[in-house]
Every structure is written in C-alpha cells, then in structure tokens.
Image: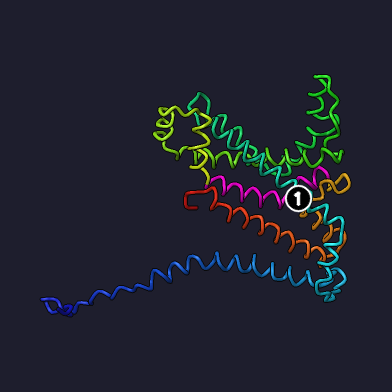
C-alpha cells in the first residue's frame, strides 16, 4: 500500500515525514553536551595543568618555570610538615565521618516519629546547613574562645575549660565538632527520606515475632538504609578532606601543625610561600587520597550494601 499523494478534490497531499530514530539521540546529546563540556573545561583540563605544574618549579610572579620531573614529589614525601598534614587530614576526616553519621542517623530516627512540633525540630537541626561557613566559623570562634560561651558554661559548673583552639590537644577535635554540627543536618534529611521508605509492615512483623526495637533497627532498618549510609559516607569523606574555611578562620593551621590539614597546607605553600609547583604536587596527592578512600568505600559496598546502588 502506497501513501496517497493527492486528495479526492485533486489537491496535493504531502506525506508524513518518516520517523527519525536518531533525532532523539542527538537531542539528548545536545542537552548533555554543555555539562560534559563544563566538566572537561573546568575539571579535566585544569587538573591536567596541575599535574604538569607539579613537575615544574613554578613561580608565576617572576615568570620562572623549570622542569624538575618528580623532584617536587621527592621533596614532598620527605617533608615532615606534609606528613603532619596527612595525619591531621585523616584524623579530621575520620572524626567527622563517624560523628556525622552517628548523630545524623540518631536524629533521623528520633525525628521520624509522629510528635507535636516535629517540623520545628527538623528545621532547627537543618538550619546550620544554610548558614554561611564564615558566619558559622566566626560564631564558633566566640563560643570556643578562652572566655567564650563554652568555658563560661563550664565555669558555672566549677570547671576551668581549656583554650580549645590554642591547645594542640584540643584544637583539631574542636574543628571536628564545628564541621560535624555544620553538616549533620543535610545527612539527617537524607536519612529521614531513607527511613520513610522502609515499609512499616516489615517492622511490625518483626515486633510480632518478638524482635526488640534495637534488634529490629540493626536487622531491618540499617540494611534497608545501607545505600544511603554509603552515599552519605562518601560525600562526607570527600567534604571533610577538602575543609579549609574553618581552619583559616579559627586556627590558621596552628598551634604548630596540629590543624594544618592538606588543603590549608596547599594554600599556604601556593599563596604565602609562592611555591606553586610544590603546591600542585600537594594537590595531586590530595586528589589521590580522596580517590583512594572513595574507591575503598565503593568497593566495600559488596560486603554490607545488599541493594543496588
């Protein structure tokens, strides 16, 4: 059967155009292209430049650039300040990761119940997320000052508080607390969404079988929200390894190298010491650490995340 080319009254009929299966494909490519181009221009290309700069001794203010090969890396791994920075970064990241997830899950479980004023409580715990990092850090600077709010409260109880940010034994822990309470609200919201997706019938069936609330939580709730735990764990780890503003505003990397985490060490090397090649090597190593920890978390999911992620 052929398509008609003329109407009964003799007018010419234009046949419907053939479907073009590639049209949707090219339309999808057109929508994705700006994002892909942005990643390449703003992510991949600058990173390749950073790798190249890390192989040179580069001082942009004087225009000097000398190829040194792996010299910056050899110097880096022999630098005790770099070793201290790696230890500080890993300690900070581990502390933030554990405290953030424990507090976020606990808050989500508490705020997942039906109770009066629950929306207000959720808003209160989420509000630090929308506060600027600078305002949040300055506020905590007043609270953690020797004569600040926290030591004032302890003094009422007859306790002399330490200099939280000036003592090497408490400075990094104080930064962990500041970072945890800044970001715990976001993870709390993600866990709330995950908890509300757990079928209530399963928990009721477990209770009928005699499972205690704690047993029901560990055997039913935690496995079902495991994909969310994995996601928040990866995002929290990456964010904690990139921390900078609270360090600069509260401790300036001190006392000594107690809070001189890798991003701050990189900043001081590049913009204070003007050693951009050496700072680029720090950036490459920091990227490698973040990539290694992310891949470790991702591959470990096969042992404890049973749902598809």
Q: Position of residue 22 (x, y in %)?
A: 38, 73
Task: Find residue 9 and report its image quarter.
Answer: bottom left
Q: Which residue is drawn at the image coordinates 43% and 33% (left, top)?
A: 203
Residue 27 seen: yes
Q: Residue furthest left?
A: 8
Q: Which residue is drawn at the image coordinates 73% and 41% (left, top)?
A: 176
Task: Find residue 205 and report its image quarter.
Answer: top left
Q: Which residue is drawn at the image coordinates 43% and 28% (left, top)?
A: 207
Colour scheme in use: rainbow
Which class describes the residues within 10 Å of circle 1: few (<14), some (14-19), or many (20+)?
many
Q: Position of residue 90 (x, y in %)?
A: 74, 50
Asked whether 1 or 15 is in front, the reply is 1
Taking the magenta stretch, the answer to whether it contains residue 204 is no
Predominant SS along the magenta part: helix
Asked whether 154 or 204 is in front, the reply is 204
Task: Find residue 190 and report its image quarter.
Answer: top right
From what the image shows, is residue 188 above or below residue 44? above
Task: Please indicate whether residue 136 sits to the left or right of residue 40 in the image.
Answer: right
Residue 11 seen: no
Taking the magenta stretch, the answer to whether it contains residue 245 is yes
Q: Which residue corresponds to mark 1?
A: 89
How many numbered dots are placed on residues in this image? Answer: 1
Q: Quadrant of the N terminus?
A: bottom left
Q: Which residue is drawn at the image coordinates 58% and 33% (left, top)?
A: 107
Asked whether 276 or 60 is in front, the reply is 276
Q: Position of residue 284 (x, y in %)?
A: 73, 64
Which stretch did the figure color magenta? Answer: 227-251
Badge 1 element? helix
Q: Position of residue 23 (x, y in %)?
A: 38, 72
């Amino acid at each position: 059967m052929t398509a008609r080319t003329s109407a009964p009254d003799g007018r010419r009929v234009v046949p419907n155009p053939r479907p073009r299966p590639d049209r949707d494909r090219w339309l999808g490519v057109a929508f994705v292209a700006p994002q892909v181009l942005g990643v390449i221009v703003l992510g991949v290309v600058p990173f390749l430049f950073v790798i190249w700069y890390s192989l040179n001794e580069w001082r942009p203010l004087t225009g000097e650039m000398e190829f040194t090969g792996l010299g910056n890396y050899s110097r880096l791994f022999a630098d005790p300040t770099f070793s201290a920075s790696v230890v500080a970064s890993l300690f900070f990241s581990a502390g933030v990761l554990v405290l953030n997830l424990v507090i976020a899950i606990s808050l989500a479980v508490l705020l997942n119940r039906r109770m009066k004023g629950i929306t207000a409580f959720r808003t209160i715990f989420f509000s630090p997320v929308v506060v600027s990092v600078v305002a949040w850090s300055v506020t905590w600077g007043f609270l953690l000052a020797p004569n600040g709010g926290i030591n004032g409260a302890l003094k009422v109880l007859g306790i002399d508080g330490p200099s939280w940010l000036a003592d090497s034994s408490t400075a990094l822990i104080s930064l962990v607390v500041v970072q945890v309470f800044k970001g715990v609200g976001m993870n709390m919201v993600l866990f709330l969404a995950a908890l509300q997706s757990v079928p209530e019938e399963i928990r009721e069936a477990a209770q009928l079988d005699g499972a205690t609330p704690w047993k029901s939580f560990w055997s039913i709730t935690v496995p079902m929200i495991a994909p969310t735990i994995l996601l928040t764990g990866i995002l929290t780890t990456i964010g904690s390894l990139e921390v900078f503003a609270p360090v600069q505003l509260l401790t300036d990397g001190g006392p000594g190298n107690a809070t001189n985490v890798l991003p701050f060490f990189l900043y001081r090397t590049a913009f204070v010491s003007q050693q951009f090649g050496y700072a680029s090597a720090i950036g490459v190593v920091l990227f490698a650490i973040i990539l290694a920890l992310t891949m470790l978390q991702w591959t470990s999911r096969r042992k404890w995340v049973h749902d598809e992620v």
